[in-house]
């Protein structure tokens, strides 16, 4: 299983699946797409925040088109609400300064890769005394989600995410190695990186070895970025549970803002306006099964029919890292 959606796109874009089709290798697409795993409830909460008076809601571009129970943030924006996207969370600081009379809410998403930037936003908002800036935290963690998949899907080896590993270090995969006894290789996103990572996995299997290896050693080591880790530890803590699209509730699988920064936590400050329930996904949408490695996009009845990148039904078709988007772009 390639955990990260970026690896899925490398497989598709460069024809690696076709190149390897004569082998006995089967690639299972994992839950490593942060937009894809956001449940409808979190989208509905973002929309509720956007609908508050005197509010500017800000997020990353991929989140704009993810469908919630009734609408997406892009549709809410078309209806007149002030919903914006940025390329860096630190841009939110300037927007908050320019609009002191409004609540500026940043909907933070992403795995461990982007969490330090949101942590830095919290630190700077406090340092600069911004009283109108708030964060709705949706940062999630790779190891618990992968463990949830491995508990229910037969997987023989993992290609582990590279950019996540830059922040966390490859050490986060050691418990998975010990628990599930399968080869794990941290590989880069270039096609030659992936091919070498696959080769290393095959060598482990042939030699009857089970190891954690770092192919992407020009960037990744075992310890990771310690400064980034300290930023996260200062501002956030692990939640007791978090809902994932397709995977359900997973214990200790996401971050929340800690009590020291509670005044910036949109989930606490605006608790009264946030919905607590949402509608289920379309009954024919297989996004959940795809994220669990139990289906491929071409197995879905909606794929390339009613569900396309222009009119996505499920989140896996929305994100640039989604498996359905990769199949649509490179196989359709």
Image (tube, rainbow, N blue to C red):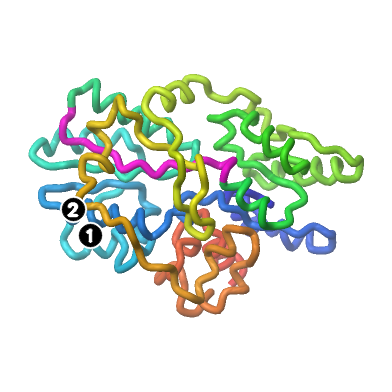
Name the quadrant containing residue 108: top left
Disc 2: CA contacts within 10 A as few (<14), some (14-19) or many (>=20): some
Name the quadrant containing residue 161: top right
- Judge whether 29 appears above or below 145 on screen: below
Disc 1: CA contacts within 10 A as few (<14), some (14-19) or many (>=20): some
Residue located beneath label 2 in the image: 82
Q: Which x, y percent locates residue 239?
A: 43, 38
Name which residue lies at 74% across and 43% down: 180
Which residue is nearer to you in this view: 194 or 138?
Answer: 138
Which residue is nearer to you in this view: 177 or 320?
Answer: 177
- Judge whether 67 appears above or below 117 on screen: below
Chain part drawn in magenta: 130-144
Residue located beneath label 1 in the image: 77
Asked which secondary structure carries label 1, the reply is helix
Q: Would you say residue 141 sits in the magenta stretch?
A: yes
Q: Would you say residue 324 sits in the magenta stretch?
A: no
Name which residue lies at 80% across and 57% down: 25
Q: Earlier in the sequence, mark 1 or mark 2?
A: 1
Q: Which x, y percent locates residue 236?
A: 39, 30
């Amino acid at each position: 299983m390639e955990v990260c959606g970026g690896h899925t796109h490398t497989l598709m874009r460069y024809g690696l699946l076709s190149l390897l089709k004569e082998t006995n290798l089967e690639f299972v697409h994992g839950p490593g797409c942060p937009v894809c795993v956001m449940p409808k409830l979190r989208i509905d909460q973002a929309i509720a925040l956007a609908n508050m008076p005197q509010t500017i809601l800000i997020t990353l571009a991929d989140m704009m088109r993810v469908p919630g129970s009734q609408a997406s943030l892009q549709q809410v924006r078309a209806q007149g609400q002030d919903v914006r996207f940025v390329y860096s969370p630190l841009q939110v600081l300037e927007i908050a300064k320019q609009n002191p009379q409004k609540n500026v809410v940043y909907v933070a998403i992403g795995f461990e890769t982007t969490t330090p930037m949101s942590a830095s936003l919290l630190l700077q908002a406090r340092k600069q005394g911004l009283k109108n800036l708030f964060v709705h935290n949706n940062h999630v963690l790779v190891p618990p989600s992968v463990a949830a998949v491995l508990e229910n899907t037969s997987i023989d080896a993992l290609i582990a995410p590279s950019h996540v590993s830059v922040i966390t270090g490859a050490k986060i995969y050691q418990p998975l190695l010990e628990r599930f006894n399968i080869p794990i290789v941290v590989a880069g996103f270039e096609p030659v990186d992936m091919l070498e990572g696959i080769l290393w996995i095959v060598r482990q299997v042939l030699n009857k070895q089970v190891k954690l290896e770092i192919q992407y050693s020009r960037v990744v080591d075992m310890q990771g970025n310690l400064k980034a880790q300290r930023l996260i530890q200062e501002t956030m803590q692990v939640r007791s549970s978090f809902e994932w699209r397709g995977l359900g509730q997973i214990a200790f699988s996401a971050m929340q803002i800690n009590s020291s920064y509670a005044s910036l936590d949109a989930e606490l400050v605006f608790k009264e306006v946030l919905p607590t329930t949402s509608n289920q996904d379309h009954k024919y949408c297989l996004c959940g099964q795809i994220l669990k490695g139990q289906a491929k996009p071409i197995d879905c009845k909606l794929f390339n029919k009613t569900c396309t990148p222009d009119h996505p039904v499920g989140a896996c078709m929305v994100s640039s890292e989604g498996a359905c988007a990769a199949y649509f772009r490179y196989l359709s």
